[in-house]
Amino acid sequence: MLHSRSLSLALLVALLVPALAWKGENGGSVRLIAEVLEYAESGDIVTIEGRVADSTTGSGSLLVAIFEDASGQVPVAVPDSLMRQLDVRTGEATGGQRYRVTGRWRHKQMDQEVWGIQAQQIERLQTP
């Protein structure tokens, strides 16, 4: 009986550690897109790096860029104030240009069923 409780407690801790580690970072560390998709909760500040695979318009004239890395894809709502940071127009990809994006995890300005990043900062990275 004691062994079963210890095993259950160990399993619970193992499941909680990634989520707790995620919360401790407060958006400062670059995360894989797959990690953001799995662990981010409404309002979290997240940072990713990747390329623009596609782009479209969201509500109004808002640009929604689909960013990708080796682990997955995520939509990023790009406000007018940051559009000039991207080498992209609606319906285009950026090719080899990589970016670092920091923003809030939410679904505002996206389809109500689609979560993504509301960009607050976009930085062009040096291409190798």
Image (cartoon, rainbow, N blue to C red):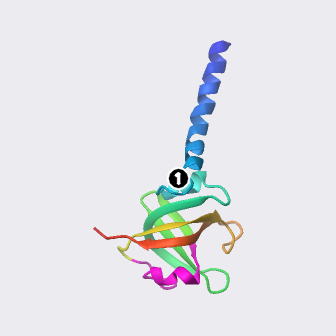
Quadrant housing the N terminus:
top right
- Amino acid type shown at disc 1: Glu
The image shows residue 72 at horizontal and vertical percentages of: 49, 60
Q: Nearer the viewer, residue 26 or 40?
A: 26
Q: Nearer the viewer, residue 107 or 104?
A: 104
Q: What is the quadrant of residue 75 in the picture? A: bottom right
Left or right of residue 72, residue 128 in this image: left
Instruction: Residue lying at the far right in this picture: please name it.
Output: 112
Q: Can residue 115 be seen in this snapshot?
A: no
Q: Residue placed at 54% from the left, 51% from the top?
A: 25
Q: Which residues are magenta?
A: 76-94
Rendered position, 17 above or below 109? above
Q: Is residue 77 magenta?
A: yes
Tell me the SS state at disc 1: helix
The residue beneath circle 1 is 35
Rendered position, 116 above or below 4? below
Q: Residue placed at 48% from the left, 72% from the top?
A: 122
Q: Residue placed at 59% from the left, 51% from the top?
A: 39
Q: What is the quadrant of residue 8 in the picture? A: top right
The image shows residue 113 at horizontal and vertical percentages of: 69, 66
Q: Residue placed at 48% from the left, 85% from the top?
A: 89
The image shows residue 80 at horizontal and vertical percentages of: 57, 84
